[in-house]
Image (cartoon, rainbow, N blue to C red):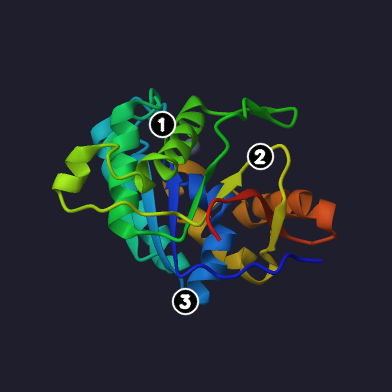
């Protein structure tokens, strides 16, 4: 069975790199966008170190990855895309990053924030989690609470006219103990198309098969053929 989830009117996805969301949460993004959610991606870096090819500079790769991300967003129905331009590969959960994310949350005013689990050091038997993913998740959660909703944290944002904003719920991808499963079977091909847009990263790999396998794995606990699992924390009803 699937979980009946109310579709948020506005959602913000906070991730470290272009393509992160397409790998892990873009099924939920596509579903919500189809049902009328306004969605903003806020990416901490441009993924400019994401190649070991000596023939391509980080500067050139940043432009390629930005275009790839724009194409993926268009496929998913994501309306806004913000790059915070922190350095790829050495992202840290600094106060500066927390302030920048607080600014974006107060500006876009999402009902829901989707991000990744900052405590996840590894997944399964073959994957060490990238430190940028942990840093982005950590700063995102700290921005949601307390700083986005507390008036006098980062008073410089108030001076810019950015009033406090209460995010209703966060959806955390990659948590060891998920409590919500979203059935993404109807949008699995859309998710694969969006991931395939990141050509510099996935080339001609069989992304639909990859995603189908991941979605099956995540759905197993709920008897779903294809799911994205989250730890949902409801901060305000
Ligand atoms: Zn990444």
Q: Earlier in the sequence, mark 1 or mark 3?
A: 3
Secondary structure, mark 3, is: loop
Horizontal side of 16 relative to 25 (left or right) equals: left
Question: Can you give x and y, in whole percent of width and height, for residue 204 in the image?
Answer: 54, 50
Q: Is residue 237 visible?
A: yes
Is residue 116 shown above or below 195?
above
Viewer-side label of 1, 3: 3
- Identify which residue is drawn at 31% across, 51% down: 164
Q: Check disc 3: other Cα within 10 Å, few if <14, some if 14-19, many if 20+.
A: few
Is residue 231 shown above or below 139?
below
> Distance between the Cα atoms at labels 2 and 3?
27 Å
Tally the numbered discs.
Answer: 3
> Distance between the Cα atoms at labels 1 and 2?
28 Å
Mark 2 highlights which residue? 175
Which residue occupies the extreme left position in the image?
A: 159
Q: Is residue 56 visible?
A: no
- Identify which residue is drawn at 36% across, 40% down: 147
Tell whether label 3 touches label 1 (CB within 8 Å). no
> Distance between the Cα atoms at labels 1 and 3?
36 Å
Q: Which mark is residue 36?
A: 3
Image quarter hosting the N terminus: bottom right
Is residue 112 shown above or below 118?
below
Mark 1 highlights which residue? 51
Question: Can you give x and y, in whole percent of width and height, for residue 63 in the image?
Answer: 26, 44
């Amino acid at each position: 069975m699937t979980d009946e989830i109310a579709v948020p009117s506005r959602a913000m996805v906070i991730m470290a790199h272009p393509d992160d969301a397409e790998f892990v949460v873009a099924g939920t993004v596509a579903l919500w966008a189809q049902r009328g959610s306004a969605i903003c991606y806020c990416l901490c870096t441009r993924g400019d170190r994401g190649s070991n090819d000596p023939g391509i500079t980080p500067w050139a790769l940043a432009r390629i990855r930005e275009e790839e991300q724009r194409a993926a967003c268009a496929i998913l129905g994501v309306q806004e895309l913000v790059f915070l331009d922190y350095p790829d590969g050495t992202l840290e959960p600094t106060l500066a990053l927390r302030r920048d994310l607080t600014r974006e949350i107060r500006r876009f005013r999402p009902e829901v924030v989707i991000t990744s689990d900052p405590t996840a050091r590894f997944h399964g038997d073959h994957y060490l989690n990238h430190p940028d993913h942990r840093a982005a998740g950590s700063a995102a959660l700290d921005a949601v609470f307390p700083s986005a909703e507390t008036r006098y944290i980062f008073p410089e944002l108030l001076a810019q006219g950015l009033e406090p904003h209460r995010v209703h719920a966060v959806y955390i991808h990659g948590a060891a103990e998920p409590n919500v499963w979203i059935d993404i079977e109807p949008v699995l091909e859309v998710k694969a198309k969006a991931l395939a847009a990141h050509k510099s990263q996935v080339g001609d790999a069989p992304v639909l098969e990859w995603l189908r396998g991941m979605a099956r794995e995540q759905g197993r606990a709920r008897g779903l053929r294809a799911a994205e699992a989250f730890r949902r924390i409801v901060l305000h009803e």
